[in-house]
Image (cartoon, grey):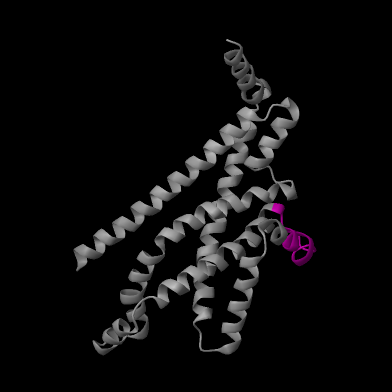
Amino acid sequence: MGLVEYFRNSIYMNLIYEDRYQLILSGLWITLLLTVCTFVLGTLLGMAFCAGKGSRNKVIRGLSNGITALMVKLPPLVLLMIFAYLILADTSFSAEVISIIAFTFKCASHLAEMFRSAVDSVAPGEVEAARTLGYSKWQAFFQVVFPQALHQVMPLYKTQFVLTMQDTSVVSLLAIQDMTRAVTIITSRTMDPIISLVITSVVYLLLGFIANRMLSLADRNKHLKSKEVA
């Protein structure tokens, strides 16, 4: 009975008292917003970096390789501090926008490496065969290289979404009230971190699982459509 009473009181103090569950819900919204914005923009920028890595222009190729190598090696917290206190220190951007920009470069750099490896894994002979059949350079890429590269990179792509969500957990450094900061605030008031930490862990696991399933379904639907066309 003592353990049951403890958990009952803990749940009440961490979630119900003073409507503290609203802190977690608002933190969840911020976490989702940062993660989705970062991942979408990171995907687009990652494609640009990928193209830059394969460019024949030495300057573009060098910049793309240099930026991605630097961003991949920097820890998320250090990268956020560099953008917040150095690169974007004199701008009027909000803390949320600065975080999205910083983690977009981080996400894009990881994805660029994945995309480039996936594109390079496609046999050059397939591209040559497509060009022989009259395909343009872009048609050969989007109809021959891209579908194979997408299938190759999808497992890592799904993992990167989870890693991006984990990276955003350090935004509390800029006083952004995400899930992590919400739990910290509740814990500082109750001095009992167990329930709030368990809830936060479960929420992160569920978000990762849902995102993984959604991306898997999208990938499966693409393959089914491509088979129907074939």
**Where is 197 relative to 48, above or below?**
above
Front in this rendered view, residue 34 or 213:
213
Residue most extreme to the top: 1
Decide whether residue 213 is among the magenta residues. Answer: no
Quadrant of the drawing holding the N terminus: top right
Image coords of residue 193 (percent x, y): 67, 30
What residue lies at 25% left-to-right and 59% top-to-bottom? 224
What residue lies at 53% left-to-right and 38% top-to-bottom? 203
Q: On the image, which quarter does residue 119 sit in?
A: bottom left
Decide whether residue 89 is among the magenta residues. Answer: yes
Front in this rendered view, residue 173 or 29:
173
Bounds of the magenta segment: 81-95
**Where is 65 relative to 44, above or below?**
below
Q: How many marks?
A: 0
Q: Is residue 21 visible?
A: no
Image coords of residue 114 (percent x, y): 48, 68
What residue lies at 65% left-to-right and 71% top-to-bottom? 70
**Where is 104 relative to 126, above or below?**
above
Q: On the image, which quarter does residue 90 sit in?
A: bottom right
